[in-house]
Image: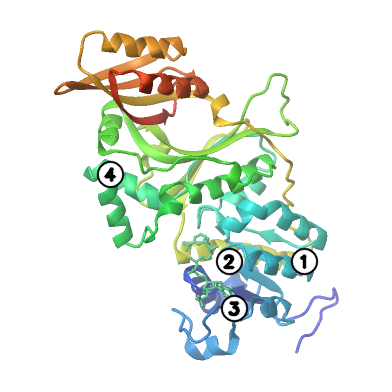
Amino acid sequence: VAVSDAAGNRAGPLRVGVLGCGNVGAAFVALVDSGSDAIRGRTGIELEVTRIAVRDTARPRPGIDAASLEKRVLNDPHALVADPEVDIVVELMGGLEPARTVILEALSLQKPVISANKELLSSSVAELALAAEVAGVDLLFEASVAGAIPLVRLLGESLAGEHIVRLTGIVNGTTNYMLTRMSEEGLGYAEALAEAQLLGYAEADPTADVEGYDAAAKAAILAGIAFDADVRSVDVYREGITHIEASDIAFSHKLGYEIKLLAIAERVGRVGGGLEEDPPAVSVRVHPAMVPKEHPLASVRGSFNAVFVEGDAAGELMVYGRGAGGLPTASAVLGDVIDAAHHLREGGRARAVRLRTPDLHPIAELKGQYYLVLDVLDRPGVLASVAAVLGDHSVSIRSMEQIGLGDEARLVFITHVALEADLQATLKSLSALDSVKRLGSVLRVIGPEKA
Ligand SMILES: NC(=O)c1ccc[n+]([C@@H]2O[C@H](COP(=O)([O-])OP(=O)(O)OC[C@H]3O[C@@H](n4cnc5c(N)ncnc54)[C@H](OP(=O)(O)O)[C@@H]3O)[C@@H](O)[C@H]2O)c1
């Protein structure tokens, strides 16, 4: 029987309703079931999972004993949210609907919501954050980016006063695993993908990972928190790793680089722009890049994630850890639930996300260095004509390697800093040359020249 304390708070444990009991949901329920005494000992917060919504109520759930599951399980997420035995809602179903609707229902009932749903948050965070603001309760989503790594909290709280200049992250464990295997074992793309699928790192349909959609959703969420900007995944420039060849990896090693799929969110300087531009001028993008071996991100191996943060006052810092997996993600969810529980008990809220419509700069306006590969006819004058095309578009060559391939030659260039639009125009002109047989990979290069 619920009893209220003097402040009107209900005595006893805070009751958590969990929407979804898959990889993350089952791990979360098991963490709370087995750890509630320890959680109370450390935080003073008593938690109890009282309801669990799934599609198939008959299915056993790993780590949750059948009798206790049966008492709590139901198949109607709307009913779970409305249940008076639920104080805090944890959304671990994934997908856009019904997740969005049930989160809005929970917030309208002034129930705090914790979600790990990157797909939903990267398309609707402004709407959900506003609903939380109106209701005066928390909407927390640490687990939606980089699993167990406390990145949302780092950016939104520890670095709340920091003028963040740039975030550069490895936020997709599947592609980082594949690129690591290609780099360390010389595997081709197809072999690396088959291995990742065998180990359960990649889905049968790997599109979301290998084409960069997953990383783009996370980049949008991170940019939102770092720059108080309403960035959605559709706004993020995106390229995946499907075109990376074993020869690119071999070349990158020779030149002192590792190839990584990076999510980059950065402020873009504007003439006359002050410290806090309004709207914030930003670029958010996901693409593979050559990272110098001495950069901390180059040594992030396997399925690990890491994000390198650059701030005006804080300088450079990096967080590293498990970016996915049921248990690491459940750990981040639990941290948010404990925060929300503290706020319910003691009052207060997490810092509200202020989302302004950003001035998003297209990639064509950015400057960078590039790696490009051309297969050309091995004839006198060809190199001069290629160099002329580059020069005509103001793209200057920093280094070049030539490898004989019978009647053809492979030219591998690293450019000096150039405008992306000029580089794209260069590629168009190069592909029109009769002597150019194939345009190979084009990769952006991180440092050392300043853009
Ligand atoms: N897995 C990770 O490593 C990871 C990492 C970071 C973030 N996330 C995010 O965490 C969320 C959950 O991921 P997951 O891997 O745990 O997914 P999952 O294994 O597919 O689990 C989804 C769960 O939601 C339930 N569900 C789906 N639609 C439902 C509906 N309409 N009504 C009731 N229940 C419904 C499913 O029920 P049934 O079991 O009965 O089908 C299942 O239990 C996603 O947003 C994902 O992006 C996952």
Measuring from the top left, give residue 259's x and y in whole percent.
36, 37
Q: Secondary structure at mark 1?
A: helix
Q: Which amino acid type is shown beneath numbered disc 3? A: Ala
Measuring from the top left, give residue 178's x and y in whole percent.
33, 49
Residue at the disc numbered 3: 53
Asked if ligand 1 lies within 8 A of label 1, the reply is no
- Specify whether residue 411 is in view: yes
How far apart, in angstroms, are the residues tagged by discs 3 and 4?
Answer: 41 Å
Q: Secondary structure at mark 2?
A: helix
Disc 3 or 4, which lies upstream in sequence? 3
| Residue positioned 44% across, 25% down in the render | 447
Mark 4, mark 2: which one is toward the viewer? Answer: 4
Residue at the disc numbered 4: 182
Name the side, left or right, on which 48 lies relative to 2.
left
Mark 4, mark 1: which one is toward the viewer? Answer: 4
Disc 4 or 2, which lies upstream in sequence? 4
Residue at the disc numbered 1: 346
